[in-house]
Each structure stands twice: as structure tokens, then as C-alpha cells.
Amino acid sequence: MICVIATVDVAAGRREELLAMFREVAPKVRAEPGCIEYVAMVDVRSGLNAQGPVRDNAVTIIEKWESVAALQTHLKTLHMADYFRKTDDLQLSLSLQVLEPV
């Protein structure tokens, strides 16, 4: 199993727009072979000292896949190509961390 943490910096004031598009594509992604988990999350104020500043224009997507091959296949699907096309003007940046359990 691998875990992907995708961080999207969203254009100011457009986070809900991106989340609406995520909600549309998420069921298709969750139905893909090898998908274990696929969920969007936003920062929450916790009061914990170690937490950095809350990012009002960020979305973190937590993904779990059976393998890197399943992730690579996911990125080539038509529904993800459509999602990336539709959200291109909403995303200022995208970063990925791909992790494995130890």
C-alpha cells in the first residue's frame, strides 16, 4: 500500500469551487481498481503549538492505493484528465508526497 498526500494551493476565494469538482470525480476514483481511500480535507484550527498557520486557500487530498502502478493508472484515466482540465485555472500549485508504511 502507498499513501499520497496531495496539497493544492487554490486561487483566492475559489476553494469551494474546487471542492465541488472534487466531489463530482471522487466516486469515480473510489471505484477504480486499487483505490483504498480518496478524500479531500481542509485545515482546521486546533490550537496545537506544532500546527502551522491555517491555510484558507488550500486543499489536501489524502489517497491510499494498493500500489504505485494503481496510482499511475489512476492518473491516466479520462475522468482525471477532465478533472485536471476543469480545475486548471483554480490551482495555483500542486505538490505530491508519495509514502509507504515502514
Image (cartoon, rainbow, N blue to C red):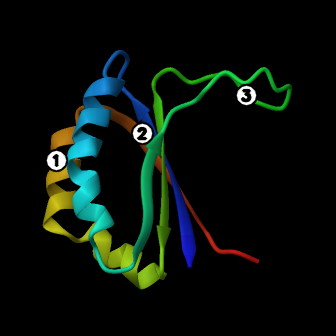
Point out residue 97 in the picture as x, y percentages from the top left corner.
Answer: 57, 59
Residue 97 against residue 9 in the figure, above or below: below
**Mark 2, residue position:** 93
Residue 53 against residue 4 in the figure, above or below: above
Disc 2, SS: strand
In screen coordinates, is 18 left or right of 46? left
Query: How far apart in space, not on screen, are marks 3 and 1 (Cα)?
Result: 31 Å
**Mark 1, residue position:** 85
Residue appearing at x 70%, y 75% in the figure: 101
**Mark 3, residue position:** 52
Residue appearing at x 73%, y 24% in the figure: 46
Residue nearer the viewer, 44 or 76: 44
In screen coordinates, is 54 left or right of 87? right
Please state which amino acid type lies under the numbered disc 2.
Ser
Residue appearing at x 86%, y 25% in the figure: 49
Q: Quadrant of the N terminus?
A: bottom right
Look at the numbered discs 3 and 1 and tell me whether their residues touch, using CB distance below 8 Å. Answer: no
